[in-house]
Amino acid sequence: MSSKKILLIAPTGQVGWELHRCVQTLGQVLAVGRNPKAQVFIDLADPDSIRSVIREVKPDIILNAAAYTAVDKAEKESELAYTINGTAPSILAEESLRLQALLVHYSTDYVFDGSNDKPYTEDDPVNPMGIYGASKLAGEQAITAIGGKYLILRTAWIYGLRGNNFLLTMQKLAKERPELKVVADQIGSPTWSRMIATATAHILAQLNSPLYPVEIEELSGIYNLTCNGQTNWYEFAKSIIAKNYNQPNILPIPTKDYPAPAKRPMYSVLSNDKITKTFGIELPDWDKCLQLCLASDLNNKI
């Protein structure tokens, strides 16, 4: 297992930062970002850059934690969104197939339109409502069409203690405003980035074990990976700032009162049955993970 070469793309993002710490015991990890001052860097908007890095490193495992995630901005930057979320994953898949490497790629609940009334399975029809979701779907479809060894992990409502996300935004606004208005009619499953990374590491450890009875190719496909349970943004916000010293008044509002350039799915809860049955992975409920996340932040500040 220690001989495995793991190429981690985007180690400073929410998921990538956690992955960098979770996969260290699984092999030799090379983390590459887009900083041109680094000894090795990668630009997902440049196909030649992607191919050059992979052919130089010759990894056994590629973890692609990079994505264009600016949902509203993507409506105006569709070409860039499709390049990073659609074209780059296709090149990663081609290079992975050439090397017979395993590609782990992360996707999103935004490939669905939110019209379901029960958790989405991996086989439910996709119908993205905006450029972001459509570009992520393009990446999924490209990887699937190319084939080889791959895992596409669909997750949702990602938050953590780094980067730009709902948790950090609510904490910041709670210090600045006496009143917050938060959407209460969109339903999903908040998922801590550390849980995604930990689950990924567990899966890789299984696949890399000489005792594992199934070939990776047989398991290649799309898997949902979110925390259990469901809530809305309003209840999520209340849970985030429940222990804050500053307690603003939080008001629930409908989506129509918070207009945005890109439409969001009203319901995007994902079923995790497939990943549980295949790998024995089951993440805790979203509220328990949130408390663990907030506690870890508090411990870091002590």
Image (cartoon, rainbow, N blue to C red):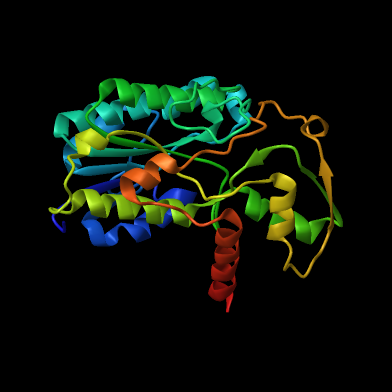
Tell me residue 133's x, y (percent): 53, 27
Looking at the rendered image, the quarter that the C terminus falls into is bottom right
Total marks shown come to 0
Who's the residue at 54% across and 69% down the image? Answer: 296
Whether residue 59 sits left or right of residue 110 in the image: it is: left
Tell me residue 164's x, y (percent): 59, 48
- Residue 238: quadrant of the picture: bottom right
**Which residue occupies the foreground of this view, 214 or 171?**
214
Tell me residue 217's x, y (percent): 21, 34
Tell me residue 291's x, y (percent): 60, 65
Q: Is residue 33 visible?
A: no
**Which residue occupies the foreground of this view, 231 or 237?**
231
Who's the residue at 39% across and 47% down the image? Answer: 276
Q: Is residue 25 visible?
A: yes
Give the farthest residue toward the bottom: 302
Who's the residue at 58% across and 44% down the image? Answer: 157
Looking at the rendered image, the quarter that the N terminus falls into is bottom left
Task: Relative to 135, say whether 204 is above or below.
Answer: below
